[in-house]
Image (tube, rainbow, N blue to C red):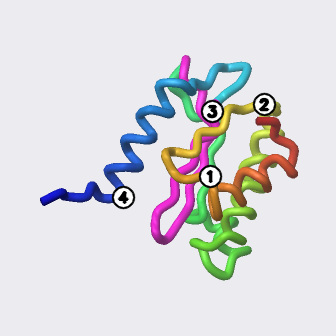
Amino acid sequence: MVSKKSRSVVRANKHKKLRNRLSGTAQCPRLAVFRSNNHMYAQIIDDTAHHTLVSASTLQKDVKANLEKTNNIEAAAYLGKVIAEKAIEKGIKDVVFDRGGFIYHGKIQALADAAREAGLNF
């Protein structure tokens, strides 16, 4: 009998493979995205210094106040816009996109497209 791996295990393995190829530097940090069933989280990380430069999530009061729901495509797009605005304020224009092992579709794609439209390059 063949047992099927859970989605979370498959995602974690994909993320490990991605992280072997992706790394953020001070000049071009990594935009890491994580989504749970209820919320989305995005942070821009300098991997050489092991330091988070900018972060945003749908748990923050100012972000949550502008959203009807925190786990849909509209929320992901708004979060992408917020993280891009915070990054540009700190002087970050170029990033490497780390989709966190998630399929580049739906919420992840909406966040990435909104961040690009708001001024980030990746």
Determine crowd level at label 4: few under 14, some 14-19, many 20+ residues with C-alpha closer than 10 A: few
The amino acid type, in three-letter code, at marker 2 is: Asp
Query: Is residue 70 shown in magenta?
Result: no
Q: Residue at x 44, y 32 (%)?
A: 17
Which amino acid type corresponds to the residue marked 4 in the rendered image? Arg
What amino acid is labelled 1 in the image?
Answer: Tyr
State the CA–CA distance, disc 2 to disc 1.
Answer: 19 Å
Marks 2/4: CA–CA distance: 31 Å
Give the mark nearest the N terminus, 3 or 2.
3
- Residue identified by numbered label 4: 7
Callout 3: 10 Å neighbours few (<14), some, many (20+)? many
- Labels 2, 4: front one: 4
**Quadrant showing the C terminus:** top right
Which residue is denoted by mark 2 in the rendering?
94
Sequence-first disc among 1 and 3? 3
Label 4: state its secondary structure. helix
- Helix, strand or loop for the magenta stretch, by majority: strand
Q: Which mark is residue 30?
A: 3
Q: Where's residue 118, x and y in %?
A: 86, 50
Q: Which residues fall within the magenta stretch?
A: 30-48
What residue is shown at x 79% (from left), y 56% (from top)? 114
Return the residue nearer the eye: 76 or 45. Answer: 76
Question: Disc 3 versus disc 2: distance between alpha carbons?
Answer: 9 Å
Residue 95, position in %: x, y? 72, 32
> In this picture, is 17 found above or below 71?
above
- For the N terminus, the image quarter is bottom left
- Residue at the spot 67% in from the left edge and 63% down from the top edge: 76
